[in-house]
């Protein structure tokens, strides 16, 4: 049997609908009859079906059916009429309560899913992709058809794959497999170029950190083979744009080694008295470490020794110039030195004067002529003569001689004096 008002299926022996509380219509079209009901009970039932009762009260007015359904004196005779009147209302209240409870439950689920989704997004942007995936799966289990959650699950899966690649690259670097690490790093960088969204920003940031670490490791591996200031300076310029603690530590190492190599080169140049080159070597180190104490001390030492050397050199030059002046004076005024003079008589009794001369100049001389006088022992001038020295060309320090004979002087006990000499310098 079905209620002809709400369509709810009813038991075969039901009189009123347990859904809407209306009086049921028999399937054969006959009016239903309730067992043991009198005319008054039938009127009360008809009032429940319509919602209002037409039974007049004592003053002749209308009261609500819930009040007028049965007179007080009649309630004692038929107490079941009230129960049947409240059934439809109770069913309605229960139905409404069930719908409301269901709505509240579903709304709570939606709020919970939205909260998980928001927390997952925050975790993903912070790079905690594992927590983000856990929250998204919780949300998906409650709302599988929530498209935004499904899309984020796909994106976080990609981020987890990229993070795994970063970990693999880091492992290669720890094993010093730098070539393979560099290749995979470039592949991941190319992959990230097509992955849009702020979700991948932590991956990009970590990738750049690994790139810095890679460049630092490569430079550290080359550090032992760099032994000149130029090579070290070139490597320093390569790593100078890198940031981070590892990069700063490497830059400090490079600067320290530049200073050490500069010190060594400058000290070697100083020992060779190459002061200008030594100062340049020191300055190349100070360009990278201006406050390096050993280099500053060495720079001051080089300057002092350079000044001392220049002062000594100046004194040497001045002394040399003095010597040269003296030599020039001697070469022009005292190039011919008289070593000894000999006076003898030849077989005819004539005086023979033989002079032994020496080249006292610092340069060769030639065409030497001497002029001399001959006096008695008492000082009387006996003669004046001139003679050419031989050989004609005389090296510095070598000797030459001249010979002069006088037929007028017949004695050998005379005094001979060379008064003047002329020569040419080579």
Image (tube, helix red, strand yellow):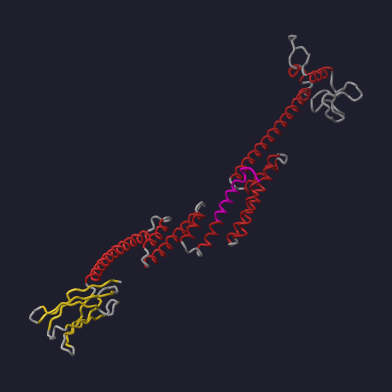
Residue 414 location (% of width, % of height): 12, 83
Q: Residue at x 55, y 56 (%)?
A: 215
| Residue nearest the viewer, comparing 205 with 180 | 180
Residue 353 location (% of width, % of height): 18, 83
Please identify the residue farthest to the right as the structure is shown: 28
Q: Quadrant of the N terminus?
A: top right
Q: Residue at x 84, y 21 (%)?
A: 37
Give the extent of the magenta segment: 194-213
Please, is residue 73 above or below residue 281 in the view? above
Q: In this view of the protein, can residue 82 be seen by the observer?
A: yes
| Residue nearest the viewer, comparing 93 with 41 | 93
- Please give left or right for residue 146 compared with residue 286 in the image: right
Q: In this view of the protein, can residue 137 be seen by the observer?
A: no
Residue 249 location (% of width, % of height): 48, 56
- Image quadrant in which you'd find residue 45: top right
Q: Residue at x 62, y 47 (%)?
A: 131
Residue 144 location (% of width, % of height): 72, 41
Please identify the residue farthest to the bottom as the structure is shown: 347
Q: Quadrant of the C terminus?
A: bottom left
Q: Magenta stretch: residue 212 in it?
A: yes
- Please give left or right for residue 72 compared with residue 221 in the image: right
Q: Magenta stretch: residue 291 in it?
A: no
Q: Main secondary structure of the magenta part?
A: helix
| Residue nearest the viewer, comparing 374 with 303 | 374
């Amino acid at each position: 049997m079905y209620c002809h008002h709400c369509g709810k299926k009813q038991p075969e022996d039901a009189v009123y609908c347990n859904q809407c509380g209306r009086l049921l219509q028999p399937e054969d079209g006959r009016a239903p009859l309730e067992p043991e009901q009198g005319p008054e009970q039938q009127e009360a039932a008809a009032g429940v079906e319509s919602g209002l009762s037409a039974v007049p009260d004592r003053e002749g007015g209308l009261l609500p059916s819930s009040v007028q359904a049965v007179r007080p004196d009649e309630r004692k005779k038929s107490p079941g009429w009230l129960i049947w009147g409240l059934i439809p209302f109770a069913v309605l209240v229960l139905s409404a309560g069930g719908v409301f409870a269901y709505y509240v439950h579903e709304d709570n689920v939606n709020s919970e899913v939205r909260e998980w989704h928001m927390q997952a997004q925050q975790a993903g942007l912070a790079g905690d992709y594992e927590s983000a995936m856990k929250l998204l799966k919780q949300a998906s289990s409650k709302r599988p058809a929530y498209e935004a959650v499904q899309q984020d699950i796909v994106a976080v899966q990609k981020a987890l794959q990229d993070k795994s690649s970063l970990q693999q690259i880091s492992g290669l670097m720890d094993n010093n497999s730098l070539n393979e690490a560099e290749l995979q790093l470039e592949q991941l960088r190319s992959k990230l170029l097509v992955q849009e969204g702020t979700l991948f920003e932590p991956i990009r940031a970590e990738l750049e950190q690994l790139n810095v670490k890679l460049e630092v490791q490569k430079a550290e591996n080359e550090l032992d083979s760099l032994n000149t200031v130029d090579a070290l300076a070139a490597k320093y310029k390569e790593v100078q744009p890198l940031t981070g603690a590892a990069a700063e530590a490497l830059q400090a190492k490079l600067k320290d080694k530049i200073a050490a190599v500069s010190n060594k080169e400058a000290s070697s140049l100083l020992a060779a008295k190459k002061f200008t080159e030594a100062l340049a070597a020191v300055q190349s180190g100070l360009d990278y470490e201006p406050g390096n104490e050993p280099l500053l001390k060495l720079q001051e030492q080089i300057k002092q020794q350079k000044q001392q050397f220049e002062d000594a050199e100046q004194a040497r030059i001045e002394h040399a110039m003095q010597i040269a002046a003296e030599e020039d004076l001697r070469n022009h005024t005292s190039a011919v030195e008289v070593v000894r003079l000999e006076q003898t008589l030849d077989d005819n009794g004539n005086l023979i004067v033989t002079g032994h001369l020496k080249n006292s100049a610092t340069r060769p001389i030639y065409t030497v002529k001497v002029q001399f006088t001959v006096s008695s022992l008492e000082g009387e001038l006996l003669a004046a003569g001139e003679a050419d020295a031989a050989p004609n060309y005389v090296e510095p320090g070598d000797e030459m001689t001249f010979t002069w004979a006088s037929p007028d002087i017949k004695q050998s006990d005379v005094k001979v004096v060379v008064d003047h000499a002329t020569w040419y310098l080579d």
